[in-house]
Image (cartoon, rainbow, N blue to C red):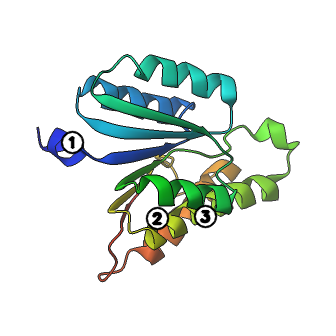
Amino acid sequence: DNLVDGLENKTIMITGARGSIGGELAKKIFNLRLKATLILIDNSESSLNLIAAFLSNSSMLKVVPRLIDIKDKKLMDDIFEEYRPSIVLHAAGNTFLEFFNDNKNKIIQQNLTSTKTIADLAVIHKVKKFVFCSSNRSSKPTTTLEVSKRLAELYLDCLNQDNSITSFIT
């Protein structure tokens, strides 16, 4: 009940809404049967449409799908400004190294840059909770993906200040 109370009547943004983690988070919120607004952010139109169609079966949940690359700071700022989310569940990120032709620096840069963009906007727009869905092995990274997640966690840790309105959870 405490979880439901914390989400009831809130605006919740999920980045990477079509991915395995983002999609599961969206479905869990759907299954809670609560009244809330769910902003779904992703850069894949077909997958975003599938998850949005599934979630639209709820009379309580307002579903707002947005086809956006989260690295586009201006578009993301517009979304934060328009919907004023109180919770961000950040599950977006590149996970498939083979798409980068072994360019390890590019995957680190893209994952870190996208997380920084979303986190900085969360601070500017006074989001209450920012949850970073990272790898369970990122505390002792051994792969490029884990390194990119760990660097993002370290950045978020730097943002967690006593006087900050936004609480960062990794």
Nearer to us of marks 1 and 3 is 1
Residue drawn at the location 66% of the way across and 49% of the way down = 145
Mark 1, residues whose alpha carbon is within 10 Å: few (<14), some, or many (≥20)?
Answer: some
Q: Nearer the viewer, residue 78 or 111?
A: 78
User: Where's residue 41, x and y in %?
Assistant: 56, 41
In-image side of 3 versus 51 (left or right): left
Dot 3 or dot 2, earlier in sequence? 3
User: Of the residues shown, which amino acid type is indicated by label 2?
Assistant: Ala
Q: Nearer the viewer, residue 141 or 22?
A: 22
Residue position for label 2: 122
Residue drawn at the location 41% of the way across and 57% of the way down = 84
User: Where's residue 65, x and y in %?
Assistant: 53, 35
Residue drawn at the location 66% of the way across and 62% of the way down = 74
**Quadrant in the rendering for residue 7:** top left
Q: Which mark is residue 8?
A: 1
User: Where's residue 99, x and y in %?
Assistant: 82, 37
User: Where's residue 108, x and y in %?
Assistant: 71, 58
Is residue 63 visible from the viewing direction of this image?
Answer: yes
Position above or below: 135 against 17: below
In-image side of 106 versus 36 (left or right): right
Work out which residue is located at the far front of the displayed protein and give it. Answer: 82
Position above or below: 17 against 11: above
Q: Nearer the viewer, residue 77 or 127?
A: 77
Gap between marks 3 and 2, in whole Å? 9 Å
Dot 1 or dot 3, earlier in sequence? 1
Is residue 141 visible from the viewing direction of this image?
Answer: no
Q: Which mark is residue 117?
A: 3
Please give the count of numbered marks on the rendered protein: 3
Could you say whether the residue bearing mark 2 is in a helix, strand or loop? helix
Q: Which mark is residue 125?
A: none
Gap between marks 1 and 2, in whole Å? 20 Å
User: Of the residues shown, which amino acid type is indicated by label 3?
Assistant: Thr
